[in-house]
Image (cartoon, coloured by chain):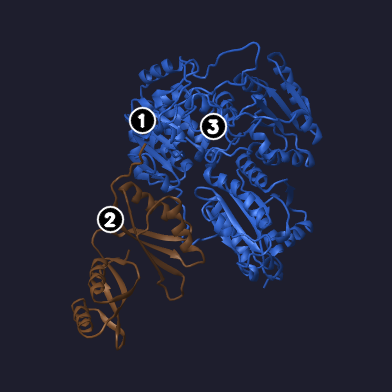
Chain colours: A brown, B blue
Amino acid sequence: MHIKEGLKERHTLSVTVTNEPGVLARIAGMFTARGYNIESLTVADITEDDSISRITIVTAGTPAVIEQVVAQLDRMVPVHKVTDLTLLGDHVERELALVKVAGTGDHRIEALRLAEVFRANVVDTTISSFVFEVTGASTKIDRFVELMKEIGLVEVARTGIVAMARGKEAI
Amino acid sequence: MPKEQSGANILVEALCDLGVEVIFGYPGGAVLPIYDALFQQKRIRHILVRHEQAATHAAEGYARATGKPGVVLVTSGPGATNAVTGITDALMDSIPMVVITGQVATHLIGSDAFQEADTVGITRHCTKHNYLVKSPETLGNVIHEAFHIATTGRPGPVVVDIPKDVQVATAPYKKPGTINHASYRPQIKGDIKLIEAAVEMLAAAERPILYTGGGIINSGPAASQILRELARITGAPVTSTLMGLGAYPASGEAWLGMLGMHGTYEANWAMNQADLIVCLGARFDDRVTGRLDAFAPKAKKIHVDIDRSSMNKTVRVDLPIVGDVGHVMEDMVKVWKARQHTKADLSAWWTQIDEWRAKKSLSYPPSTTEIMPQAAVQALWNATHKKNPIITTEVGQHQMWAAQHFHFESPNKWLTSGGLGTMGYGLPAAIGAQLGNPNALVIDIAGEASIQMNIQELATATQYRLPVKIFILNNEYMGMVRQWQELTYSSRYSESYSDALPDFVKLGEAYGWKGIRIETPDQLESGIAEMLAYDGPVIVDCLVAKVANCFPMIPSGASHVEMILADDQVSGELDDEAKALV
């Protein structure tokens, strides 16, 4: 006997939750408990009084699984609103990365040149290294990191995806 | 400003304000302040169980039989972890329950202190919601919110973990007003447009069926009444899940019996051949649907449920209606009448159903030498149904035989562990039900294996003089395991024999119960009469046929129309696909 799996789609969800202890564990744990995927998860408070956090989750599953993910999130007590940005239509997704590159001579010059092409900022420098801050779609960051490997990539830190629907309306 | 009082007193005050009459619990180090506060008051009755798991099942039984939330109080660490099975059981069966757990003092949390466990972490995914209370100032509101969440929407268990220093520290407490939760707002009324569409579908259907579930019981007794009205005006046949038994009377004209794995031939065939299934407060559980890709192939499906996540979870439906099933059915009846629909001519459908009924799928091979377990349940029903008893069960063959052969006429009379399938549920649930209904006849129909999983609760019934009855169908096997081994593994009975059984009569007597043994068919009626005549707890050890199987049965991986009946030859081996299914 072999275990079969269905065709998966990638969806980006925006979830607003009451900012209380354990809320992230509750959300993340629901995904593991029900066998759903998390490709990326970001969370930060978005209100002046620290009362509500916005979580952006990128998940993958069959359309039926995605519908369940949304419904399961929606029924959790501290969850205010769940929006499937992918279903909603056009939206922007951005990610920020810090990329440390070491090298001297030509490598150093090439790193700066590539950084300019990718509109990455230098946020730290020594005689033999840079830390670049690069923002954009995940694929852009992937490419930047890939290029830096040739030059002298030391380490990478990425935020995961934040996303928002286009247009004037709030979700 | 109200006067300051300890967290323990705030808890007791809040419970009183919430109308709590009974708590099921077990003391320990981390709840001593609460037990002291309970000692000094008379409004709440504490029932001392013998194991924390039993406290949770007793609370479930109390809740299921009374409609009120069950309340549990246990200590930290092992107290809380022992309660986890019952908490999960309540989650699966949507039982309103609030579990108060003691916790080590806040400054000790995370230090691996004595009897420390991460209770909120452990119970996060087996509760509807849970709380760790870090100050006595917030305790009162948390308790009120916990009851609000446990009892509204789809009911479920809520855990409130209270560190010992929070029980001792003081703060003012004031009863809060109406709870207006920022994010938790269950939808009670269904969308009227969808309800109108549902009514039109029902009016146009030629082969409709009402597939009802535990949601109707949870909605309250009025929902059962409105279901009867809906069935009457539409003329549609009614079937029910295990959890929904009693919502529609078994003596009702439209009753087809239970559906699903051990449901009747007519109920399962009607589901398979229906052109419209109206699912009312049920959730297309795997025990109901059988093989999903062959489930109800000809039917449009309407699903009424208070939990949006139940919609399209396993079965795609054509018309999902989110709302309390009682309210939605009431609106359906109103719309039906306002549009002056009359009962459609369903005579062809009923003729077909009568043909399926004629199979008499619940029949079983009779015996004059052995007591057939089905006959024992029938005898029990004959002797007791006029008293409108509350029946609890353990889990296994006896549970299914009880569901098949004990006929329920009203809601809140049938308490069983459906979703989680917890052996050891029945005795503590009977204790809880009896406390909520002191004058009712409460019987736990049990198996000799299951009953041993919470047998220590015999003492609880003795202590509180609860006249519960246990009726053991003793076949010396974990019968359902043995049946599956017979059907799936060529009768290789791996570890399913109940060896070294206690003498249940003497065991009962040791705990102060009356013990009765029934060994032959001619003793059955008199044994039951003797049980009923005794004003106190009775344990009946009824020796039944050892290898009787529970039929009809939809085997693993089969569809509704591939049911096995009692006279089919079934022993054998199943393929791996079927073996992988539970």
Callout 2: SS: helix
- The span from disc 2 to disc 3 (Cα, nearest Å) is 40 Å
Q: Which residue is mark 2?
A: A87
In the image, residue B572 lies at what x, y percent?
46, 22
Q: Tell me the subunit letter for badge 2.
A: A
Using the image, tell me which numbered label, if any, was put on residue B296.
1
- Nearer-N-terminus badge (1/3): 3
Q: Is residue B517 left or right of residue B103?
A: right
Crowd rating for badge 2 (residues with CA inside 10 Å; few <14, some 14–19, many 20+): few
Of tags 1 and 3, which is closer to the observer?
Answer: 1
In the image, residue B553 lies at what x, y percent?
48, 25
Q: Which residue is mark 3?
A: B245
Q: Tell me the subunit letter for badge 3.
A: B
Q: Are marks 1 and 3 on the same chain?
A: yes
Q: Are marks 1 and 3 in contact (CB under 8 Å)?
A: no
Asked where in the image residue B523 lies, by quadrant, the reply is: top right
The answer to whether residue B177 is seen in the rendering is: no
For the point 59% across and 60% down, the residue is B118
In the image, residue B485 lies at what x, y percent?
52, 28
